[in-house]
Image (tube, grey):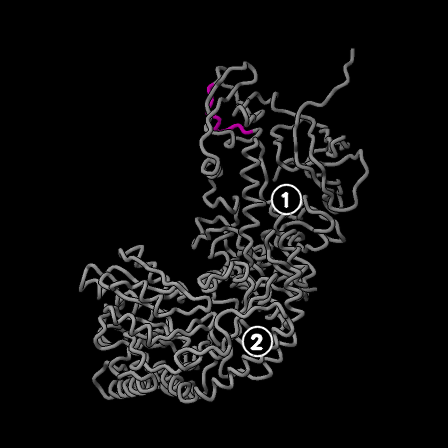
Amino acid sequence: MRVLAAMSGGVDSAVAAALAVDAGHEVTGIHLALSPDRQTLRSGARGCCSVEDANDARRVADELGIPFYVWDLADRFREDVVDDFVAEYAAGRTPNPCLRCNEKIKFAAVLDRARALGFDAVVTGHHARLADGELRRSVDAAKDQSYVLGVLTAGQLAGAIFPLGWMTKERVRAIAAERGFAVATKPDSHDICFIPDGDTRGFLSRRLGVQPGPVVDAATGRTVGEHAGTHGFTIGQRRGLGIDTADQRPRYVLSIEPVTRTVTVGTAEQSEVDEVVTGPPTWTGPEPGLPLAALVQLRAHGTPAPCQVTAVESGGLRITLDERQRGVAPGQSAVLYAPDAERGDRVLGQGAVLRAGERQRSVHS
Amino acid sequence: MTYLDHAATTPMLPAALAAMTEQLARVGNASSLHASGREARRVAEQSRERLAEALGARPSEVLFTGGGTEGDNLAVKGMFWARRAADQRRRRIVVSPAEHHAVLDSVEWLEKHDDAEVTWLQVAPTGRVTPAALAEALGDGTDVAVASVMWANNEIGAVSDVAALAATAHAVGVPLHTDAVQAVGQLQVDFAASGVDALTMTGHKLGGPMGAGALLLRRDAECTPLLHGGGQERDVRSGTLDVAAIVGLTVATTTSVAERAERTARIAALRDRLVAGVVEQVPDAELNGPPLDDVVAGGPGRLPGNAHLSFPGAQGDALLMLLDARGIECSTGSACSAGVARPSHVLLATGADPDRARSSLRFSLGHTSTGADVEAVLEVVAPVVERARRAGTGRR
């Protein structure tokens, strides 16, 4: 196959490209230039958008003997990922920009362009297994990225290759070292690539300004603190609330109301929910019949939990959790998995969380 | 492989390679006083004389450098510093926005760090700077430190009438530097006859080695050094002479200049066939820069090996990738930091819109180009453009 290897300059995508070459594919490497103001040097270990990262990717491509180009997708990335990220926070939601980038950039803008230019697929260094059109978790649970790929449709997955899902990160680094790649020991990137200093709250404040408002305790209805902007908070957040409550018990963010700029906090019990409603779902394969018993993961690195899934009239999903959960934030993706003990959890699809709360219970007298 | 990127770099001429290799095997610092040093110095000075003769300069006007970027930096910064030191009112630099980044970034550095004021010249739609545009920008010249206009543009091949520009600058007492990196070997370049005060040239664009070039600097031109040290090259460019590179540069230049008329006539004919063939297969392709048969000051108004075309609806980097996959090597313009394709600043300076600039490709022919190279392009250009158009412009 003619495949396009998306090379960030990190060790994962370097090894993925190498394995694609080994598999006999005709591979062309590309680095996505996503930041309009490209930094010359990485700040710390973070980011994948510096000129240095592009050079790291080019170095590997040259060593593999494959053509290498830089594709400038800064405009699309700004519109579809960065502006979306800011708008979601401004609306009181908690977006996942990596998921959005996979949905709109890597497996849309890039894949579409690749197909138009005559490529059959895009290979990336994501840790997930993809075989026979079925997307599954990586064998390395700690590095599994199936959550941020859960938004991809069958059509998108048909043009994707993830060579790393069957190996641990340790093995990936070992392969890179065996091949003499300079990026073998390059630190993992952890943060949001367009916020290289890791200060998400500072980034949002620069974009949205200071918008002070009250922090209200749901138990008493009293204002227990002030904040500089609702974008500094996410549902379920416990630390950094800057509040003073009489009982000194921990409080969690229950709701974010951007219009009145009110952040409501409550106790652990108050922050628990057992029902999640999402927007229209996407499916990685044939649409499963509803209702459906599945596992749901409600944030990156979250724990999958048993649930029942039904349809709601608006076209979204109602996900009823078997056990109550804390910190379910609108804007996150509810990714559904089919339990599959033998071969690992299979990704069914996802819907964006619209709201979470208490299940409607029938009243017994 | 079809190599059509001679404006980026060109294969070494066998004679230059042989002479350079021979010299590399010899010991001797041209500044040393013993026999080995004297022999190295003899070779270097003989090269200086031959290079000077080929370019219409005096040997003492030849300063060997590390190439085009160094020559441009030295001329622009050095002449700015020297002229302003002599008269503090001279803060202004008059420069074309279509220059190579070696000039542009030097000028912008001086503006940012050294209190220079930049006046950007009006560039004609062909990419040329006219004496009238220069005269207007210079004014009475009293506050101008230096002017810089390239002899021939590296992207779209536009040739300016450098002699007329030099006369215009001198009329108001301003020295003119010209970046002649693309001109030497392709056009008739006579330093004395041109009247310019400083001229940058480099070896690897005409069959010589990379990392070797020269700044031709008139004896009366003041230029503050960038590199201080052993006092070589009239104390303007210190550093141990790279004698082997100088030999390679000189043999390439003298050979290229001697064979220029015959070679460029052949290359221009190939280039004309290439452009005509491309336009025949892709009728809406547009030639950028001056017409192919343009004339300036009695010579070619466009570099004989330059074909710069826009393909509306396609992106230059997609075209380049598809051609590369088919063994055809060309360029989207001058290479850019981290390989990110930006719309060409040269095309933008000529007034072209950014979409046209982004959809352009440069084919540059040189001494190894053949009819087979042209045929190779014509064989694939139509399907390649069609496929690139399917990928779109990357914008909504």
Pinpoint residue B149: horizontal percent, then vertical percent: 35, 69
Pinpoint residue A236: horizontal percent, then vertical percent: 57, 28
Q: Which residue is mark 2?
A: B275
Pinpoint residue B118: horizontal percent, then vertical percent: 32, 59
Q: Nearer the viewer, residue A65 or A106?
A: A106
Host chain of mark 1:
A
Along the horizontal axis of the image, is B337 left or right of A360?
left
Residues flagged by tags 2 and 1 on a common chain: no
Q: Element type at marker 1?
A: helix
From what the image shows, is residue B269 above or below residue B135?
below
From what the image shows, is residue A175 above or below residue A142?
below
Q: Residue at x 34, y 86 (%)?
A: B54
Rate crowding at label 1 as few (under 14), some (14 to 19) or many (20 or more) other CA atoms within 10 Å.
Answer: many
Host chain of mark 2:
B
- The label nearer to you, 2 versus 1, is 2
Pinpoint residue A272: horizontal percent, then vertical percent: 63, 24
Q: Residue at x 28, y 80 (%)?
A: B62
Q: Residue at x 61, y 59 (%)?
A: A5
Q: Tell which residue pokes out farthest to the right in this image.
A: A289
**Helix, strand or loop for the magenta stretch, by majority:** loop
Q: Residue at x 54, y 15 (%)?
A: A221
The magenta span reads A237-244
Residue A243: within the magenta?
Answer: yes
Residue B211 appears in the rendering: no
Q: Nearer the viewer, residue A37 or A14?
A: A37
Q: Tell which residue pokes out farthest to the top in this image.
A: A365
Q: Which residue is mark 1?
A: A148
Q: Quadrant of residue B219?
A: bottom left
